[in-house]
Image (cartoon, rainbow, N blue to C red):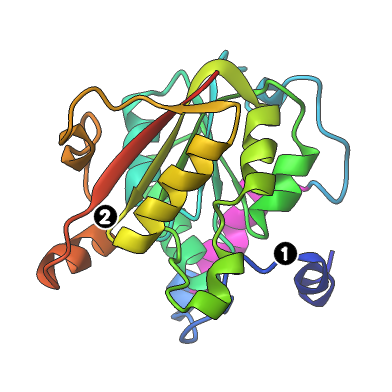
């Protein structure tokens, strides 16, 4: 599928797809590694089990949407080699950075998709995902753009369809309005329950949290991140 065709079919939850021209080495890694790891949903139907996408046939599959430079995704894939990780990132420069890092780590439990996550979610079989991470997504701060925020009732229904009951949806952001937005939408959705146990536990990072460059920027600019966790009931 061409990039023009993909861009016409997207629901536009992300902005630009390219930044500065890649350096030759980065470009080489991108074009060499992406075909090996990319899930080609436009070429074949989803398997009955997403474990078929991986050579080691993992029993559990986790999904991270909008992984940026891939710091968290690489960290988690390194921590849990028996789990299959699927990452979505439409921004070419971020994907290139991630592919270079993943190649250096020699990780084999990673697969990626480089377009609109809703397309991948609709392609995936039901009850196939053991957890979804949405970390520092584009907040679309202007009210006229709120409809482009990834968290909405339709996408939560997409999450609920592919997630196994008892699995977790994790959301992190340093933008208060998006945190409140996400709490409201998840509270209104029948398939998700906020699992906060104490008044301030949503300010505590997730277990073995490596941090991300977006989080570092938030701290530099005086914003406090929130780490929300929702149970797929």
In which quarter of the view is residue 69 placed? bottom left
At 22% from the left edge and 29% from the top edge, which residue is drawn?
207
Residue 36: in magenta span: yes
At 42% from the left edge and 74% from the top edge, which residue is drawn?
141
Q: CA distance from mark 1 to mark 2?
A: 26 Å
Q: Is residue 16 left or right of residue 196?
A: right
Residue tagged 1: 11
Q: Is residue 196 left or right of residue 191?
A: left
Q: Magenta span covers which residues?
A: 27-40
At 60% from the left edge and 51% from the top edge, which residue is drawn?
152
Q: Secondary structure at mark 2?
A: loop
Residue tagged 2: 212
**Mark 2 neighbour density, 10 Å: few (under 14) some (14–19) many (20 or more):** some
- The picture places residue 173, in percent across and down from the top left corner, at 33, 55
Q: Secondary structure at mark 1?
A: loop
Q: Is residue 25 above or below residue 60?
A: below
Q: As rendered, which of 78 and 67 lies closer to the eye?
A: 67
Q: Is residue 99 left or right of residue 172?
A: right
In which quarter of the view is residue 215 placed? bottom left
- The picture places residue 199, in percent across and down from the top left corner, at 17, 33
Q: Is residue 169 left or right of residue 177?
A: right
At 46% from the left edge and 18% from the top edge, which residue is drawn?
82
């Amino acid at each position: 599928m061409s990039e023009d065709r993909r861009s016409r079919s997207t629901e536009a939850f992300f902005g630009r797809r390219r930044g500065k021209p890649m350096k030759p080495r980065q470009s080489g890694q991108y074009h060499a590694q992406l075909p090996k790891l990319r899930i080609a949903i436009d070429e074949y139907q989803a398997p009955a089990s997403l474990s078929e996408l991986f050579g080691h046939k993992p029993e559990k599959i986790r999904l991270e949407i909008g992984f940026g430079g891939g710091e968290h995704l690489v960290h988690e894939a390194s921590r849990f080699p028996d789990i299959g990780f699927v990452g979505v990132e439409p921004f070419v420069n971020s994907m290139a950075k991630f592919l270079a890092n993943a190649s250096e780590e020699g990780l084999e439990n990673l697969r990626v998709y480089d377009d609109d996550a809703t397309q991948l979610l609709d392609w995936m079989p039901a009850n196939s995902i053991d957890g979804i991470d949405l970390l520092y997504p584009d907040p679309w701060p202007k009210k006229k753009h709120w409809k482009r925020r990834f968290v909405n009732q339709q996408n939560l229904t997409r999450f609920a369809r592919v997630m196994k009951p008892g699995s977790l949806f994790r959301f992190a952001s340093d933008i208060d309005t998006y945190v409140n937005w996400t709490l409201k939408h998840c509270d209104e959705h029948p398939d998700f329950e906020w699992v906060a146990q104490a008044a301030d536990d949503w300010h505590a990072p997730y277990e073995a949290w490596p941090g991300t460059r977006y989080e570092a920027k938030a701290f530099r600019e005086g914003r406090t991140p929130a780490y929300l966790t929702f149970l797929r009931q």
